[in-house]
Image: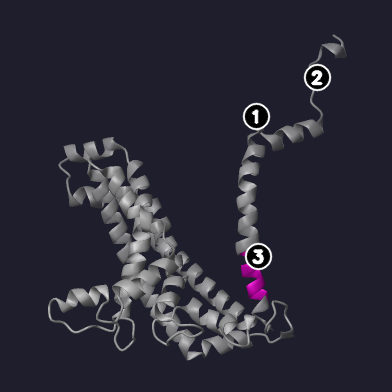
Amino acid sequence: MTDAAAPAQPSPSRGLWHRIRGRQGRNLWFAAFVAPFFLGLLIFVYVPIVWSAYLSFFEARNTVTPTRFVGWANYSYLLHDRLFLNSLVVFVAFAAFIVPLTYVCSLGLALLLDKITIGRAFFRSVFFIPTAVSYVIAAIIWRFGFFNGARFGLINSFLRQFGIDPVNWLGGGNNLYWIALVTARLWLQVGFYMILFIAGLNKIPVETYEAAALDGASGWRLLRWITLPQLKATSVAVIMLLLINAFQAFDEFYNMLGSIGSYPPYGRPPLVHLFLVALGGGQQDLGVGGAGTVILTSIIVVFGIVQNWVLNRGEKA
């Protein structure tokens, strides 16, 4: 036998390139499609978070460049700020209310529309279209149309038919402004999460329901033992998104309750307070704004960890 009869071995550098490239260049195509989104996430999400955390330990007035190291002073200022603490407490309660309410409404709507056979696409579109509406536009419609405190406001006109005096919905003398805020948020969000639940429902095999029906399960028992467990992955994602959105509330609150350059002390989301402190005043203080961003991010991360712990605990039990 001679060496010429042996099969040719690929060079080490060529073998490494083939492993990186993958079969039929799949790794390269994966990188080509994922890289733009990863870069966007890195530049517009993670870099600002890291920079805000760095900036929070400095005095940075009217500039994004740190000027003087102040340690934990910005955090101490915020944690002793009554309005900021009040906004955190109110929005923890707001999240505890709006997250399950939106979850139940979205899931109920998805189950309802999944059962109908006539006009299914039409009704899905009807409930999904509000998702495309800007929060600012919705807030303006709610503020000047539905919940206008004057006699000609739509809700007040309806109530007048029953002899009820006009209500100052957004004035703050009562807690009725929450009705306007919650209904606007539901109108804007329910359709989007309904679509996520419908996608999850479509992944449940029909055979699973047929087997359960043969065992005599129906109605609530099907929902409790088949549908909800099969929707667990979707539910985790929906709850996390709802939680993040609750703490990121800004547009509808600011445009419904605020006025030019000011915001009342009630119904104040943490982001609105940080906006007024860091950017809205005559003297910007981005160091305090960065500290507030870190506090809010920490709260969301803690809630996310607790949520995963509770769900995983239930799965292991």
Q: Give the alpha-carbon distance from disc 3 to disc 1, as whole Å.
A: 34 Å
Task: For the N terminus, give its image quadrant.
Answer: top right
Q: Which element type, helix, strand or loop, lies under badge 3?
A: helix
Q: Which residue position holds label 3?
A: 47
- In the rendered image, residue 118, in percent from the top left (x then y), is placed at 22, 41
Task: Look at mark 2 in the image and give the residue it sits on.
Answer: 8
Left or right: 83 in relation to 96: right
Q: Which residue is mark 1?
A: 24
What segment is highlighted magenta in the picture?
Answer: 46-54
Q: Amino acid at mark 3?
A: Val
Write the residue at 64% across / 38% down: 29
Amino acid type, residue under disc 2 in the picture: Ala
Q: CA distance from mark 2 to mark 3?
A: 48 Å
Residue 287 drawn at (x, y percent): 64, 81
Q: Can you name the residue that lies furthest to the front here?
A: 152
- Judged by depth in the image, the label closer to the viewer, 2 or 3, is 3
